[in-house]
Each structure stands twice: as structure tokens, then as C-alpha cells.
Image (spheres, rainbow, N blue to C red):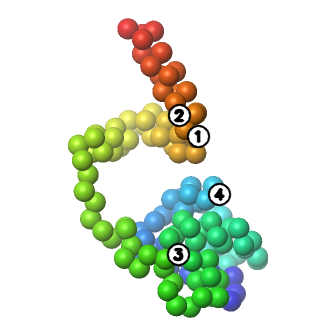
Amino acid sequence: MTNTEIGARIKQRREELGYTLQQVADQIGVARSTIQRYESGAISKIKQPVITAIAGALDTQPGWLTGEQESGAPANTGTSAKQPLVLDDETISIIDELRTRPEMRILFSVSQKASKEDILMAVRIVKALREENQ
């Protein structure tokens, strides 16, 4: 399978899930433009660990992306992106904070790849700063 064909499968699956280039890039730790270059076939040889990471982000099998596996393309044919979400009050509150406060988006973005220990340390620091300011 050519790079262009692999890229077309990546794009097809990304669009099926309703993901942006940036969302996929963030999940695998590369730049948005890199995903765009994979999709266009501009990158001459996509390494297997990258294929595996992209497949994981797109909830599909690496073999489907590379054309080695034709059947059962998506790992989850009833994609979670199309299922209705039921949000509790706490989740709605968090989403509202992320939507309305840019500083919260920064904090959330940084915390996505943090270890549990790092997050607990950050919580202690924020609590200490709050106490200091009261």
C-alpha cells in the first residue's frame, strides 16, 4: 500500500470519528502538520511505532491502516464519537471552566501528559497558594 493510500485511511478514520488534525496530533505527541503530512502521503516512510500510535488514537487496527488487514477496519465499529454523552453536573462545570477561562485550558493541557505524582504535587501547590492569598 502506498503512503498516499495509508494517509487516505488515516484521514478517513479521523473524519469518521470527528477528530481534528490537532486532536490526533496531541494524542500521539506530534505537530498538527505532521498528521497532515501523513494524510497527504508526503512522509515517505511511516515507521511502525507511529502507525501503531495513530491506530490507537483512531481506535482502529494498525494492519487496517497499512492495508495488511482489509476486514474489520475500525477496532470499534460503533464509534464512541457518535454515541450521545450523558454529562453530570460536575462534568458540565468543568467543561464550562475550560470553555470560559483560558488559564484553565492551559492548566488542563499541561496536565494531560503529567504523571499522577506531578498532578498531586500541582494540587498541593495550588492549595498552598490559595491559603497564602487568604
Return the disc, 3 or 1, that comes first in the chain's sequence.
Answer: 3
**Label 3 packing within 10 angstroms: few (<14), some (14-19), many (20+):** many
SS for tag 2? Answer: helix
Q: Position of residue 61 (x, y in %)?
A: 57, 77
**Amino acid, disc 2:** Ile
Task: Identify the disc placed on residue 119.
Answer: 2
Asked where in the image residue 105 lies, by quadrant, the reply is top left
Return the disc, 4 or 3, that comes first in the chain's sequence.
Answer: 4
Pointers 3 and 1 in contact (C-beta within 8 Å): no
Cα–Cα span, label 2 and label 1: 6 Å
Q: Nearer the viewer, mark 1 or mark 4?
A: 1
Residue 17 vertical placement versus 5 (above, below): above
Pointers 4 and 2 in contact (C-beta within 8 Å): no
Cα–Cα span, label 1 and label 4: 19 Å
The answer, for residue 43, to whether it is visible in the render is no
Q: Which residue is mark 1?
A: 115
Q: Quadrant of the N terminus?
A: bottom right
Q: Which residue is mark 3?
A: 60
**Label 2 packing within 10 angstroms: few (<14), some (14-19), many (20+):** some
Task: Identify the disc placed on residue 30.
Answer: 4
Asked where in the image residue 40 lies, by quadrant, the reply is bottom right
Return the disc, 1 or 4, that comes first in the chain's sequence.
Answer: 4
Residue located 65% across and 88% down the image: 68
**Label 4 packing within 10 angstroms: few (<14), some (14-19), many (20+):** few
Q: Position of residue 121 (x, y in %)?
A: 55, 27
SS for tag 1? Answer: loop
**Amino acid, disc 4:** Val
